[in-house]
Amino acid sequence: MIYIVGLGPGHRDYIMPKALEILKKSNIIIGFKRALDSLEFVDNKKIYINKLSDINEYICDEKNRSMIISIVASGDPTFYGITNYIKSKATLEFQVIPGISSFQYLTCKLNMSWNNAYLGSLHGRKEDFLTVVNNHDLSIWLTDKENNPAMLCEILHKEKVRCKVAIGENLSYEDEIITNGAPEEFMNKKYDSLSVFIVDRTSR
């Protein structure tokens, strides 16, 4: 059986009990370095991958049908996660075990409701960021090295978008940083490439 296991934002305190149960009975746990390194407390065999295609032999080979294989992913595996890839490639049955999304974690830390928020990803993707922001009171984004919080703040400031922003870095880890304020306060700073970025046009 193949499991896609969501680890939540990263720290073990936020891994769901069901996810821990599956991980501890797995024959193999597969994932990228950051995800696997957060599971030092789980002693089962771990296999590090460098690219998604590295998992193909595990999700397609009939000899693995009798094994319990967990493929771990940060956050919620069904939101811009690895689930779609595995669904398109797997010949073996698989099941997704949910994880707390980074969006959930950050909005809870900010005591912020996100009922009507637009949820988007700029992580390796292109979206019309400015149009979306102008059409929604609240939008929450995954970022990457190119589409980073400083660059997004520069766009907001340049286009005179009246808003407040919040930036979450290394969420749930010991070096977690959460900042919020006006876009111009953050334009020339450096941020972790995998930050979560919130644009709130109701607070302006």
Image (cartoon, rainbow, N blue to C red):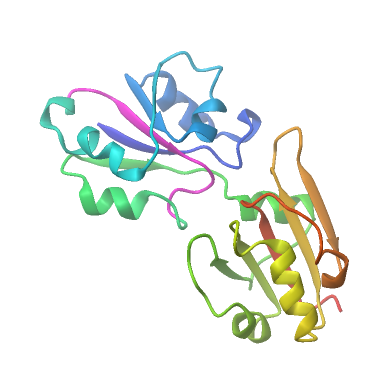
Let me know if residue 76 is in the magenta part.
Answer: yes
Q: x, y (%) of residue 154?
A: 76, 74
Q: Nearer the viewer, residue 56 or 111?
A: 56
Let me know if residue 25 is in the magenta part.
Answer: no
Residue reaching furthest top? 43
Picture quadrant where residue 153 is located: bottom right
Q: Is residue 58 above or below residue 202?
A: above
Q: How many numbered dots are placed on residues in this image?
A: 0
The quarter of the picture where the N terminus appears is top left
Residue reaching furthest left? 62
Q: x, y (%) of residue 111?
A: 79, 56
Identity of the residue drawn at 53% across and 24% down: 39
Picture quadrant where residue 91 is located: top left
Q: Is residue 36 left or right of residue 202?
A: left
Identity of the residue drawn at 83% across and 63% down: 186
Residue range in magenta is: 66-78
Q: Nearer the viewer, residue 162 or 158?
A: 158
Q: Is residue 63 above or below residue 87?
A: above
Identity of the residue drawn at 34% across and 22% down: 28
Q: Is residue 171 above or below residue 162?
A: above
Q: Is residue 42 left or right of residue 11?
A: left
Q: x, y (%) of residue 72?
A: 43, 36
Identity of the residue drawn at 84% across and 75% down: 203
Q: Is residue 65 left or right of residue 122?
A: left
The quarter of the picture where the C terminus appears is bottom right
Which secondary structure dominates the residues rendered in magenta? Answer: loop
Q: x, y (%) of residue 162?
A: 82, 82
